[in-house]
Image (tube, helix red, strand yellow):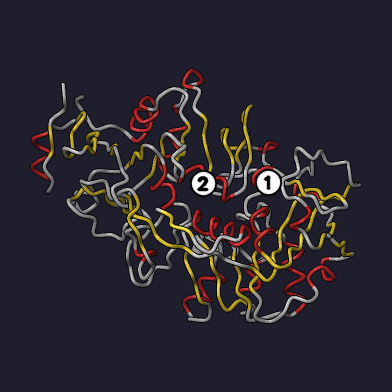
Amino acid sequence: MAKFAATAQDAVAGIQDGATVLIGGFGNAGQPMELIDALMDCGATDLTVVNNNAGQADAGLALLIKERRVKKIICSFPRQSDSWHFDTAYRAGEIELELVPQGNLAERIRAAGAGIGGFFTPTGYGTMLAEGKETRMIDGKGYVLESPIYGDVALIKALTSDKKGNLVYRKTARNFGPIMAAAAKKSIVQVSGIVETGQLDPEVIVTPGIYVDTVVEIAPQAAEGEAH
Amino acid sequence: MSEKLSREDLARLVAQDIQPGSFVNLGIGQPTSVSNYLTAEQDITLHTENGMLGMGPEAHGDEIDQDLINAGKVPVTEVPGASYFHHADSFAMMRGGHLDVCVLGAFQVSATGDLANWHTGAPDAIPAVGGAMDLATGAKDVYVMMSLFAKDGTPKLVPECSYPLTGVGCVTRVYTNDAVFLLTPEGVRVRETFGTTLEELQSKMDIKLLPPTE
């Protein structure tokens, strides 16, 4: 049953050193910036972070990396024009990188939430990202065995929650939210608004509340554009 | 044709070759320019792998919405009939063979359709793969747009890729400023040339080129 936290700090309290943290967002769309800032403030370190990227500019995940709180990152696209904090940490040998093709990253997270112990995927077959992995020919096509990625915690951003923790998202900010919510032991969600139970149409709920542990309302900043 | 195709004409040619009603993913870079030449009559639905079908043109001014971006993280718009889905569904859509065409750039393509477009192999480079390997794997047709020759004059359509692979045997066509190549079970067939001839191309390339079929 979803609980409601008063602040982002309360929501992330209890994240331990060494935790695997799944962080939603693709670029800045869907990135739970306030939850990441709260994670920064709570002091947890030695983290393994799972995100599509490795931080942008001087905010959010990039700052966690800058402060060397992330020992390992599992992502598909670390190198960007503004990934300078990751680049510095990586070149100094101060962060471990597990590079995963984007669809395999998503499917590995999905598999964790769905109780799948592993799966054969054609993506990456015959490439250096499949080196050392079990492969199999199935109906004449090559596949690579990939394993699930479980999280101790997921930090995600949605548009609206009801009092049951049912979530709807907004446009391409949905990205990793639904699968990360399912793949973590504890999923923490920041939303722009909370409505009474029954006010979300059951037909449009994307993440059922069963996957949601903690919800915190963070009013969207004016610069983020319209909330609805 | 008497001269090499410009980048714009190449994008126009790729756009013309996409069958009406297709679901299409255009990769980052040169392939994105294909969207400028798709016509309303073609009724093409564009996919962006961060989770959307029915992507419209780049957003400008008041249209910009940070929650609506494409795979290159550029703000875009939605067209009527658009839909959103999460990342695992988006890549399942690709891997599951539901997209008709994917257009990608490349460092190299081999005669058997191997693609190299994600990593130069330089030892000091920070690797980043994104959706490149997924895009290469799932679409029914993978078209590559690239220059046929590197700056040093070496061909980029080669017997075997020397750069790290993105996918094995996945490319079906290669569009270049000099010619269009069809990668078929019989070999590499030249569909048409621009400002050159099959014989001239053959003299500069290390793979056997088959003539156009009538």
Identity of the residue drawn at 19% across and 25% down = B2
Q: Along the horizontal axis of the image, is A24 left or right of A41?
A: left
In the foreground, B40 or B20: B20
Q: Is residue A83 above or below residue A29?
A: below
Please provide percent x and percent y for residue A145: 43, 62
On the image, numbered disc 1 is attached to which residue?
Answer: B67
On the image, numbered disc 2 is attached to which residue?
Answer: B92
Q: Along the horizontal axis of the image, is B176 left or right of A118?
A: left
Tell me the chain of label 1: B
Residue type highlighted by circle 1: Asp
Identity of the residue drawn at 46% across and 43% down = B96
Quadrant of residue B198 within the rendered picture: top left
Residue type highlighted by circle 2: Ala
Give neighbour class at mark 1: few <14, some 14-19, many 20+ (Cα, 10 Å).
many
Distance in Å between CA atoms under marks 1 and 2: 22 Å
Q: Earlier in the sequence, mark 1 or mark 2?
A: 1
In the foreground, A179 or B128: A179
Helix, strand or loop status at disc 1: loop
Please provide percent x and percent y for residue A189: 77, 59
Give neighbour class at mark 2: few <14, some 14-19, many 20+ (Cα, 10 Å).
some
Q: Is residue B118 above or below residue B191?
A: below
Residue at the outermost top position: B41
Q: Along the horizontal axis of the image, is A131 left or right of A36?
A: left
In the foreground, A114 or A172: A114
Helix, strand or loop status at disc 2: helix
Identity of the residue drawn at 61% across and 43% down = B75
Please provide percent x and percent y for residue A215: 82, 59
